[in-house]
Image (spheres, rainbow, N blue to C red):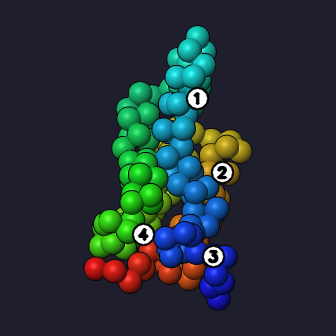
Amino acid sequence: MCYPSNYDDNGHLKLPWLFWLVLVLQARTWVLLVVAGASREQGEAILSLFYPDRQAFWLGLCAGLPAAAAFLLSGRRQHFPRLWRAWQYVLIVAQLALLIWQLTLVLQNETSGIVAMLLIVLDLFALGWLATSRYLRACFSTGQD
């Protein structure tokens, strides 16, 4: 059920806070890049800790592009309604790709431990929520074309 408080000043549904957390989860390599850049001297050590393989780092940046684009697009969704409506499916596919990639890394013993398992659980939850949330689906259905 949608209440008047769920709408912003422009009459669009407010995006839920969980949506922003899912975007941060999808763009985790971008977040790590910003943290490494902000910590100047330790930046290289931080990146090496999480991404000893540079190719995996670049793949992580590519995988986070849909989430980064969603951050930018969310503020202009009324101007690009068709693109915004389709972007939910782009985010679902990106989340599925991240989950498969994370599972592949674990199965190939390239990463292990509690952090890898936590990322898999979070990726599964995010995928399920992106695919099934009726409120989120309503946020992506702008009703404009």
Say which quarter of the image contains residue 9.
bottom right
Element assignment for label 4: helix
Q: Label 1 neighbourhood size at 10 Å, few (<14), some (14-19), many (20+)?
A: some
Looking at marks 1 and 2 on the same chain, the residue that comes earlier in the sequence is marked by: 1
Q: Looking at the image, which residue is at 57% across and 79% down?
A: 135
Q: Nearer the viewer, mark 3 or mark 4?
A: 3
Looking at marks 2 and 4 on the same chain, the residue that comes earlier in the sequence is marked by: 4
Residue position for label 2: 117
Q: Label 4 neighbourhood size at 10 Å, few (<14), some (14-19), many (20+)?
A: many
Looking at marks 3 and 4 on the same chain, the residue that comes earlier in the sequence is marked by: 3
Q: Label 3 neighbourhood size at 10 Å, few (<14), some (14-19), many (20+)?
A: few
User: Is 9 left, or right, of 85 in this rendering?
Assistant: right
User: Is 13 left, or right, of 74 in this rendering?
Assistant: right
Looking at marks 3 and 2 on the same chain, the residue that comes earlier in the sequence is marked by: 3
**Front residue (pair 109, 141):** 141
Residue type at mark 1 is Val
Q: Which mark is residue 88?
A: 4
Residue 23 position, x and y percent, is: 53, 54
Q: Label 2 neighbourhood size at 10 Å, few (<14), some (14-19), many (20+)?
A: some
Residue position for label 1: 35
Residue type at mark 4 is Gln
Q: Looking at the image, which residue is at 56% across and 49% down?
A: 24
Asked if residue 75 is positioned above or below residue 142 in the image, the reply reads above
Do labels 1 and 4 touch, CB within 8 Å? no
**Front residue (pair 52, 127):** 127
Residue 94 position, x and y percent, is: 41, 59
Do labels 1 and 2 touch, CB within 8 Å? no
Gap in angstroms between the C-alphas marked 1 and 4: 27 Å
Residue position for label 3: 6
**Front residue (pair 144, 91):** 144
